[in-house]
Image: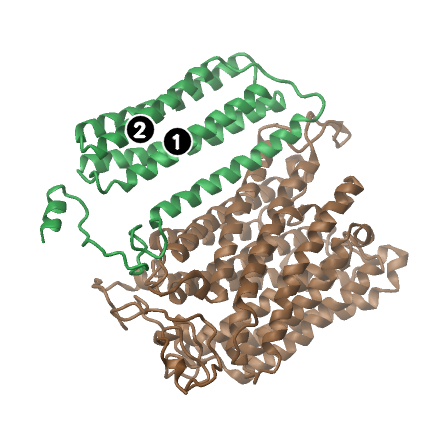
Amino acid sequence: MQDSHAHPQLGFWRKYVFSTDHKVIGLQYLITAMSMAIVGGILSLLMRLQLAWPAELWPSLERLMPVAFEGGPMKPEFYISLVTMHGTIMVFFLFTAVLTGGFRNFLIPLQIGARDMAFPFLNALSYWVFLLSCIVIFSALFVTGGAPYGGWTAYAPLSALTAIGSNQDVGMTLWLAAIALFTASGLMGGLNYITTILTMRTKGLSMMRLPLTQWSLLITAILGLLAFPVLLAAAILLVFDRTGGTSFFVPAGVIMNYQELSYSGGHPLLWQHLFWFFGHPEVYIVILPAMGMASDILSAFCRKPIFSYRMMVYSMVAIAALSFVVWGHHMFVSGMSPFLGSVFTLTTLLIAVPSAIKTFNWLGTVWGARIRFTSAGLFAIGFVSLFVSGGLSGIFLGTSAADIELQDTYFVVAHFHLVMAIAPLFAAFGGLYYWFPKMFGRFMNETLGKIHFWLSFIGVYAVFFPMHVLGIGGQMRRIYDPTSYNFLVEQQPVNVFITIAAFVLGATQLIFLANFFVSIFAGKRATENNPWKATTLEWQTPCPTGHGNFGPELPTVHRWAFDYSVPGAPDDFVPQTAPAVVAAKH
Amino acid sequence: MPVLTEEKKHGGVIAPPREPTGFGNGDGDDAAGGSFPVSKARVAMWVVLTAVTMLFAGLTSAYIVLRGVPGWQHVPLPPLLWVNTLTLIASSVTLEIARRSVLGNRQQAVKLWLGSSGVLGLGFLAGQVAAWRELVRAGVYLPSTLHSSFLYVLTGVHGVHLLGGVIGLTYVLWLAYQHRLTPVRHEPLRLCSLYWHFMDAVWIYIFVLLVLG
């Protein structure tokens, strides 16, 4: 362990639990997010059971969850709360947390040549607040009446009316509290990330020499900073509608239990506008780090520089900027004027341009490369495939005319799962296989990794591709029983197929979990600092990296992060720290 | 090393002078020689201010949208709010005087004017609570009309943020008593001042919004 500054010897709790070391905090985020993934995944499998076999009785599940399965079949209220919690947990507590909390914390100081984040204590605090938010959202599953049913989007007026039932009372309050805590944690984290990347880069590391992972993490942090407070504003107003009797989101004339409620003047659409003004940048907060990481991993395993680094950076900036003017495409069917719809169509199609540029650049990177098909490399390639598949359906949904037909159908479910859930998941898997030696000093098992990749790759297409068909066929989102509509009955076999595929996909992840946890203790040891022969700064540190990251002296950077297969260089990569003269040898 | 002794005399934080190298030594602390022309504490403060701006932007957009709904009823604002506004502006003025005092190394003046800002800030918050009570006495509650709802919510959210500013100001006052604010090194005062003036501007903005609404 290389320690460049004197430290009193820390006990177990300060070293591994209440640590302020960014690497420990990053791993804490990762493990917590993985746990939330398991919870969210189980919720989705329960949903799939209901969708495939709607009239089925589940006695064993009834024993476990007597209120949800009273009498045998799943109750509709339980189903809709599953939908809400699955979405909430996955979007916030898995994807935003694992990519931003987990990888960001671990990688930023390492890749910029710093010893830790700008504010290590605040960093630790952001994790513990995040953990608290996870506990709060998890507890919403167990309160009387169960979890809320607004969907992860919590549309008003449903979300504003506590008298509907205790799900919408205690359950919804816990949901709001968890989101507020998560926002606080995210802002604390974002503050650290922006400050660290801007002010603590080591000597020679100009912005245009940063790995794409760092650019994506910086841009994502700025997006979060601009978007999350708007969600907080909406949540504050919602809390007052729920507990203070205000009418921000509830109009006059709402009747419940045959009585007109005393609200007046509010506007339910206001919630949608505020939520989606946050919600659209949020999906880019999820995908941008995935794009950054996949770019770097792809480059490393193709032994080629990323195609047009400059355009990759500019594209990410363009995507981030445009993400603030597309939110209306979530609301095409809300009654907006067709002209406004066409404006949002224009901006949404515009945002496809930088995304396409990035896609072509990934293809350009892979083209003619001597690809090393490691698990990490496979997942990076898989990311590109899934992003293309998911992105293409986005073009249909982004045009208001087509969206009128497709909104709130399974076509949308297919789109966002592919592009926001599975593609980032693949990038996260790639990142875990890739940086595992740096985190733990050991390798994950490559054979199991490849099995995990192929089964997952086939599995996700088996689960999500048929959903496009279901959606065009008219199956609505969040529906409890598709067979209650005659025109959907003939598509029911597709639902059964998807459910079976989902269970297989879920079981496949057990391979990953076993591989991950066993390898921490018994994986093949990493005997060198840079097993993947990559150029970025973290590979100059030992595997696993010790406290203080670098030796007594911080590294000096002389080149960008993509000097792979430089003609005339002695090796097929030149690390960022190598002085300029090395590559000039002929 | 004479520079170190000088710093030690003031009880200030000891740090060897750094040559501007064009890049940092990895800790982001000094503005002159780091990888970025601004110190990390200042970047952090701008990040915080951006988040606060977006929060009020969200609330403002809600206000503007709902203002357009027919049936909007404007409630008369308690005149006390004008007094509170002047109090807050005064607190910004005293804070600015404190900052100039530190530049001139007038330590007693620094403590006096910092303390005054804190007292005026607390006075503002007390005044806001009093204004709420006046509204309640007049029968104007949180759910009475949308305008009153926004009045309570906007003043409340602003008040919470200003309270945070008061806590920060108290910390800076403590630093002053510890002789840790020197003409050359007084970043905490500058950052606190930035936050405070910003919250002052936000208040004036909210007030105008409520008056015109």
Point 59% across, 58% down: residue? A90
Give how far across and how far down residue B47 sits, in percent: 43, 45
Which chain's residue wears label 1?
Answer: B
- The Cα–Cα distance between marks 2 and 1, rounded to whole angstroms, is 9 Å
Give how far across and how far down residue A246 sits, in percent: 61, 28
Point 42% across, 28% down: residue? B200
Q: Colour of chain A?
A: brown
Q: Are marks 2 and 1 on the same chain?
A: yes
Is residue A69 in sight in this rendering? Answer: no
Q: Which disc, if any, is residue B95?
A: 2
Give how far across and how far down residue A131 sits, in percent: 46, 54
Q: Please state if A251 lies on the left or on the right of A97 as rendered.
A: right
Kindly identify which residue carries mark 1. B197
In this rendered view, identify the residue nearer to me: A11 or A315.
A315
In this rendered view, identify the residue nearer to me: A297 or A431.
A297
> Is tag 2's residue or tag 1's residue first in the polypeptide sequence?
2
